[in-house]
Image (cartoon, rainbow, N blue to C red):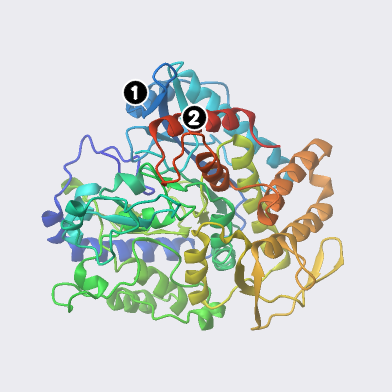
Amino acid sequence: MIILGTMQALDTSNHTPLSWEEITNNLDGVKKQGIRQFIYQYKKHKDRRNDPLYWGDEIEYMIVKIDDEEKTTKLCLKAKDVLETLNKRNIGNRTPIWTPEFGAYMVESIPERPYSDLLYSISEVELSMKERRKELTSVLEEDEIPFTLPAYPRSIHQNIKDRKGGKIEILIPVYQDIKTKSAFPAVIKTKCKMEQSYDNSIYMEGLVFGAGCCGLQTTFQMDNLDEARFLYDQLVNICPIMLALSAASPVHRGYLSDIDTRWPVLSQSFDDRTDEEKGQKPLKNDRFRIQKSRWSSVETYICPEHSQYNNTDIVYDKDSYEELKNEGLDEALSKHIAYLFIRDPLFLCSETLDQDEILDIQHLENINSTNWQTLRLKLPICNTSTGWRVEFRPMEIQLSDFENAAYAVFVFLVTRIVIAYRLNFVIPISKDVIMIIHSVVYNILFGPFTDKSITEIKITKPGQLKTKDGDDFCQMTIDEIINGNVEFPGLIPLIKTYLESKCEETDDETNYLTNSYLKLISDRASGAEPTTANFIRNFVTTHPYYQQDSIVSDIINYELLKACAKKSNGGIK
């Protein structure tokens, strides 16, 4: 059994998973222990300082078998055997770490060692990704390919269904072409309890359509908790921008959709809210009206100085909040943790129900790791040197290692300028929700995003910035946010200024590589280089067998994946 989140690799072979009915009988005790576990870890680590600024990435692959004779492709359900083979190997000193993912066709990898914050580590990122793809390929058959593709174009479950009291149903808008028909027959409409109409929608009826998607995550260890909280808040509004820039999922269940990312699919597939929690029925058996799915954008800023920008009604567990406050936590962090604890654990084992608040953190992580927000504050790991971290989660996986390295390195460099220059991107949290919604829509790149007006930022000399905080906001396109305009210098120009100030940490080769990564991001933002979603959409709509009906047939799917495989090997430079 695979447990999604930081517990995803938990070995359950010697444990007895509980049914949802059994879990509900233990919810109060488990949650109380989880809060106590957080309080203990917080007090133990709140004052730790000088942790090295390490960072890393997580790459998720799907294994696809390509039949060139029949011109078909199929997901290859051999992840378990592949992982057993990979984990028995010991290749040199840089052996990547391989772990299972949700689907039997999916595997995840991380580097054996984290990258450092020194700029020379930039050259290690793509090399590591290439080594991992090469190692994975080496244990596959000749006709099997490890794709870094967010969603296969044609293609914990039970407890989510049981908790919400119904089956998982997903609707996303179909791309309206000249000959597009209603996507699904009327007989299915009668079985659907969703309020939305099936007309002009792609219907998906299982968790696998979301959980079976692949992503690219990056995690950054910070010097201390305060710095981690500051970075978290500043990245909140970078998330929708990077989601749009990395868009790579326009095809779902064999249909061309009107969205470019997997985000709405994930959000609906992990939505375990009951009708009461959604506000469709009066509260009777449940405690909260919950506005979002478990997979969603960030709900609240976590620094006290940014609390004024939390302009939405935050639902949180008041008992947990009061306990956290009584133990000395500030209001902002208390509300963040108490918000996480409005969710129930999706997985429990009978053998681990009673835990020690000092020695264990499993109940805490069970809640934290199954709140799949765009960002995650991660606690220090028990009995290790690992400190406070921020996980950046919104990005779509890209086809090539070059592209994935470019996106990972870009976010790394954004974290560096945020910390070095104390940049302030905090705007009312309600605007982040709007940006997340906009970022999934086809061709949003050229529309305006709301961002904080930081026109008072002036570059005085290399490596130094002066800033003036204000509450003015302006509309900017992603191109302007990334590349700058008359009033705002842009993230990439700020990064280049930072790089100039750190020239002693790098060399010509690393500079060339870094500039090639920044050029890709810059060109994607300006539209000079299509996103992966645009590439896929254009491939489908211009294919000679495409009938202008939004249908991605087997032959189109086959030739699309062949083209994607070519890009995976060749990259984009």
Please provide percent x and percent y for residue 16.
Answer: 16, 42
Gap in angstroms between the C-alphas marked 1 and 2? 28 Å
State which quarter of the image contains the C terminus. top right
- Camera-side residue of 345 and 525: 525
Kindly identify the residue that appears in the image at 46 percent across and 20 percent down.
Answer: 89
x and y percentages locating residue 147 in the rendered image = 48, 32
Position of 468 relative to 37 (above/below): below
Q: Nearer the viewer, residue 53 or 287?
A: 287
Q: Viewer-proximal residue, 58 or 520?
A: 520
In the rendered view, tell whether residue 268 sits above or below residue 407.
Answer: below
Above or below, comparing residue 3 to residue 447 in the picture: above
Quadrant where the image shows the N terminus = top left
**Residue 257 visible from this viewpoint:** yes
- Label 1 packing within 10 angstroms: few (<14), some (14-19), many (20+): few
Quickly name the residue at label 1. Answer: 81
Where is residue 556, by image quadrant? top left
Q: Amino acid at mark 1?
A: Asp
